[in-house]
Amino acid sequence: MLREAKAFLNELRTKGVVPTVKITFEYLKDSFKFQINTRINKYKNKIIYDAPANPTSVITVDTDNISLFVGGISDKKGLGQIKSGDWDTNTDLIDDVPGVKGLRQRFVENKRWEETLYYQNAKEELINKEAVRGCRTIEDFVEERCDFVDRLYTDIQTNGYIPETSEKSKMNMKYEYHYRSNLEILVAISRSGDILLYDGRTRFTIADILDLTIPVQVVCRHTEWQKIRDRIHNGAEVPEDLRNHPDLADIINE
């Protein structure tokens, strides 16, 4: 609650009363829907499946094991979704995402922000958008967003990656007033068990550059992957290539 109060006061100071009230209303509305949907997923999954994971549970993964970014799903439907279909094939290489390339240019190649794809991509978006990450001009983007990312990198480099679910999380830096700010990096799990990045590209990329393991929460599992979880729970032998899979630890160790 203290974190939310600080965020509210910061928004009030920087954006004024009316925009802050609107942002706060949207935050509360979205947060409520998200929590309700997560709870619905929890009880629905218990009825349908033999070994559903707790939707809010956190697993630890090595960034080297995540190379794809996934679309085709929505976190607004809550954590712990189990979904069939081809959504898990709607992927892109994380390293091909301009923002990710730009972060590597900044922190690996030590380029000025203005020389990175992170900056260039925001500049192009601002041609057709009113704002990018809350910034209406490219100058504001550098002063606010890029400065935040610089400080975030230094903070993680100095203090390590602090999970949002830990007691120390109140010290974590926040940029936006959003319900996802209180979540770990969000991933999805494909039908074959591939871990796909869904949300949290900035923190993921920083952790990857610094060679850190990260805590994640699962926004969606493919139905076929859930069937694998169920079979193992019911006594089937764990395939050798899945014995160290982070999303099977709760079943293998039960």
Image: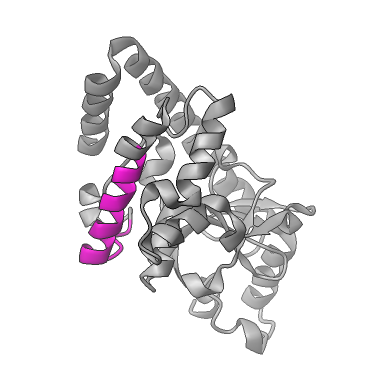
| Left or right for 57, reference 160 | right
Asked if 212 appears above or below 95 in the picture, the reply is below
Residue 214 is at least partly visible in this image: no
Residue at 40% x, 68% y is: 209
| Left or right for 187, reference 109 | right
Residue at 47% x, 26% y is: 131
In this view, which residue lies farthest toward the right?
A: 85
Q: Nearer the viewer, residue 75 or 101?
A: 101
Residue at 51% x, 74% y is: 64
Of the 4 image quadrants, the one containing the N terminus is top left
Residue at 39% x, 61% y is: 206
| Left or right for 111, reference 246 | left
Q: Position of residue 110 (x, y in %)?
A: 35, 62
Asked if 182 appears above or below 211 in the picture, the reply is above
Coloration mode: one colour
Q: Is residue 213 magenta?
A: no
Asked if 121 appears above or below 217 in the picture, the reply is above
> How many numbered circles does the render carry?
0
Q: Nearer the viewer, residue 54 or 27?
A: 27
Q: Which residues are magenta?
A: 145-163
Residue 245 quadrant: bottom right
Q: Nearer the viewer, residue 250 or 29?
A: 29
In this view, which residue lies farthest toward the bottom?
A: 240
Residue 179 quadrant: top left
Q: Main secondary structure of the magenta part?
A: helix
Residue 20 is at least partly visible in this image: yes
| Left or right for 103, reference 193 | left
Q: Position of residue 7 (x, y in %)?
A: 26, 32
Q: Position of residue 231 (x, y in %)?
A: 70, 74
Q: Position of residue 196 (x, y in %)?
A: 60, 61
